[in-house]
Image (cartoon, helix red, strand yellow):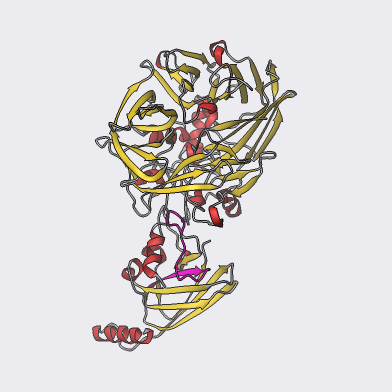
């Protein structure tokens, strides 16, 4: 027996989980605390709970839905926040629910279904919450055999080579039937020669689709101290994989891809393993005196890389990136000075403490791959706080000019205190057009939907959903991209609302 | 080799005055949820934290895999604290196969069915006291 190998492998079992921190909290019942807070802040319903595992309804349509717009907006998000009486201590710990908003000539129909993850099944069998999360563990939590024990399929959607995949931060994709949203199960990409070495390897929630239809992604395996890189062909078969050791590991959530490079920001939120941690975030330490490492990887040789440095910062999401002929990369990000939105805000909200630290501002970065330098500057005026950047998917990984994002303005905050504006921003001209949602609605991610046959970034639509907390309704809105400030040109409303989700993809056809 | 080890351990304990006579404990290990009769099931009985975290084993067994349940009886073990480590080497390559980041892709298990919280199971999770006759029922992790 290869004892040394066996021991070493087992020591690597603790690969990576999404984060969660804080929350030794009190022993007070978070469900009760949240219910009390809901009376004072009714918009907290957006972080409430689902009351069933499957929703389906036609939506009541208003305005004019364009005949050329046919397709499905697939979304996922944390939705089941209470498991058999235990309320999660972090927004991102909610079990994932996948949505399909089917838009066609005869109306808008909605369906949503809880993803039947291994966790959901195990907890149903046990009749109680079983697993630790980002910020805390339920009483009597059981141990783990690997990240997929905790896989929530609650973060983002990838629709690729005919498969619909619900993604989480640190485990396998979950395959979902695109027609009825039933769960097929954890998905493994085909490997050359029928191999299985990538089975169970973390696949992060923000893969990037390149111009040739191939997919790039990364994953982090904290205990192994490894960043993993994936390159998957348009046919869904693994083309290449790479590993880079990172010490200390951190929690990168998103990355960017250019013509020649992959770029990650590695915030100084250092992984500090310790036994018996009750939440994955609690195994990390924020060190603002340390730099944010910038990892630049060669697409043609996934082991070839170097590091640059930026001041300490925390980034969840990037918009896009591109690289010019002189080797200068430009990219943008929703940049926070620290991870408190992750470690505090999204924990406190779960027990009804609205504690928004408005600090996420949109930045542009200039990375010179020849001089090996990087600089950053704010793209927007002070007092505008952003998140959920997106682009016309036809310019992914290539030169781009327009960004869609949500924001809030310090001078005109909503009653609910979080994001309330949807924007179209022209990077070259600096022009920002936006629509301010009514205070009774909290917008979710908005996406650029190309008009069939149009040029990239030319007149298209912006499609997004919103949670109407006063009326308990979920809404989908369509804007003309070039007239976003005029408000939605068409809407559709459901007879119910589902807790705020995260990311999605619009699939035409 | 096993016999020598047991004798040595017993002599040592006797010399230390821990035991007035050689104790001979019996450990029964019931391995459940073996899903494939291919390959071998390898069992290590580890005496103490040092063996658990490092090299060596008090005793080892190598059995042809069977589908379902396999029972192994280890006799004549000195009393004390132990842990058990099991792997099902399905493809008989004498390794616990792992994926690209080192996570096992073949079944394995620890005594007490121990699992770590955000990391591997520790000695604290897996240890048990062997005194008299002890049975450990362990399900493989797949």
Vertical placement of B24 versus B40: above or below? Answer: below
Q: Which residues are magenta?
A: B82-103
Left or right: where A114 falls relative to A14: right
Q: Residue furthest right?
A: A106
**Looking at the magenta stretch, what is its main secondary structure?**
loop
Vertical placement of A501 versus B83: above or below? Answer: above
Q: Nearer the viewer, residue A87 or A66?
A: A66
Residue A127 appears in the picture as rendered: yes
Left or right: where B97 falls relative to A466: left
Residue B92 lies in magenta, yes or no? yes
Q: Nearer the viewer, residue A398 or A71?
A: A398
Residue B102 x %, y %: 42, 57
**Who's the residue at 51% across and 15% down the image?**
A436
| Residue A257 location, quadrant | top left
Residue A139 x %, y %: 47, 50
| Quadrant location, the N terminus of chain B | bottom left
**Who's the residue at 49% across and 43% down the image?**
A231
Residue A278 x %, y %: 40, 49
| Residue A77 location, quadrant | top right
Residue A485 lies in magenta, yes or no? no
| Residue A107 location, quadrant | top right
């Amino acid at each position: 027996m290869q004892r040394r190998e066996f021991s070493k492998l087992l020591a690597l079992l603790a690969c990576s989980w999404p984060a969660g921190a804080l929350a030794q909290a009190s022993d007070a019942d978070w469900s009760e605390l949240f219910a009390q807070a809901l009376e004072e802040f009714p918009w907290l319903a957006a972080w409430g709970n689902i009351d069933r595992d499957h929703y389906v309804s036609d939506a009541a349509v208003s305005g004019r839905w364009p005949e050329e717009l046919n397709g499905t907006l697939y979304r996922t998000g944390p939705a089941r926040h209470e498991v058999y009486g235990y309320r999660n201590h972090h927004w991102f710990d909610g079990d994932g629910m996948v949505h399909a908003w089917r838009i066609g000539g005869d109306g808008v129909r909605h369906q949503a279904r809880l993803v039947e993850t291994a966790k959901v099944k195990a907890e149903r069998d046990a009749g109680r919450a079983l697993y630790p999360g980002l910020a805390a563990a339920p009483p009597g939590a059981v141990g783990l055999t690997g990240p997929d024990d905790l896989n929530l399929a609650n973060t983002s959607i990838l629709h690729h080579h005919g498969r619909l995949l619900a993604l989480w931060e640190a485990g396998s994709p979950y395959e979902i039937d695109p027609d009825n949203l039933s769960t097929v199960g954890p998905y493994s990409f085909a490997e050359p020669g029928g191999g299985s070495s990538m089975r169970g390897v973390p696949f992060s929630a923000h893969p990037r689709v390149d111009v040739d239809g191939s997919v790039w992604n990364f994953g982090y395996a904290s205990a192994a101290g490894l960043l993993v890189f994936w390159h998957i062909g348009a046919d869904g078969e693994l083309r290449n994989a790479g590993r880079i050791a990172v010490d200390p590991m951190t929690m990168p959530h998103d990355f960017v891809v250019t013509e020649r490079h992959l770029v990650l920001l590695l915030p100084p939120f250092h992984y500090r393993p310790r036994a018996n941690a009750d939440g994955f975030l609690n195994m990390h330490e924020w060190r603002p005196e340390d730099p944010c490492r910038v990892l630049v990887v060669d697409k043609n040789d996934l082991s070839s890389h170097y590091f640059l440095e930026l001041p300490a910062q925390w980034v969840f999401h990037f918009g896009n990136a591109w690289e010019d002929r002189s080797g200068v990369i430009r990219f943008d990000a929703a940049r926070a000075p620290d991870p408190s939105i992750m470690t505090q805000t999204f924990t406190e909200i779960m027990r009804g403490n609205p504690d928004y630290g408005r600090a996420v501002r949109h930045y542009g970065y200039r990375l010179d791959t020849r001089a090996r330098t990087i600089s950053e500057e704010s793209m927007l005026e002070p007092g505008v706080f952003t998140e959920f950047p997106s682009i016309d998917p036809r310019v992914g990984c290539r030169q781009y000019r327009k960004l869609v994002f949500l924001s809030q303005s310090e001078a005109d905050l909503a009653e609910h205190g979080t994001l309330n504006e949807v924007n179209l921003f022209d990077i070259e001209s600096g022009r920002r057009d936006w629509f301010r949602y009514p205070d009774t609605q909290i917008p979710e991610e908005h996406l650029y939907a190309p008009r069939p046959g149009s040029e990239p970034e030319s007149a298209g639509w912006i499609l997004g959903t919103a949670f109407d907390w006063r009326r308990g309704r979920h809404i989908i809105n369509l804007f003309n991209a070039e007239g976003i400030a005029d408000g939605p040109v068409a809407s559709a409303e459901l007879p119910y609302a589902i807790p705020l989700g995260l990311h999605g993809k619009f699939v035409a056809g | 080799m096993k016999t020598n080890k047991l004798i040595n351990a017993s002599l040592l304990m006797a010399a230390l005055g821990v035991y007035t006579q050689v104790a001979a404990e019996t450990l029964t290990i019931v391995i459940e949820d073996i899903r494939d009769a291919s390959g071998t099931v390898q069992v290590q009985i580890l005496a103490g934290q040092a063996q658990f975290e490092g090299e060596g084993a008090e005793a080892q067994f190598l059995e042809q895999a069977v589908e379902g349940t396999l029972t192994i009886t280890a006799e004549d073990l000195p009393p004390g604290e132990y842990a058990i480590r099991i792997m099902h080497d399905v493809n008989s390559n004498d390794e616990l196969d792992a994926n690209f980041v080192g996570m096992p892709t073949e079944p394995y298990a620890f005594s007490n069915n121990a699992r770590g919280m955000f990391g591997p199971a520790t000695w604290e999770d897996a240890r048990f006291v062997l005194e008299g006759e002890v049975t450990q029922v362990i399900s493989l992790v797949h």
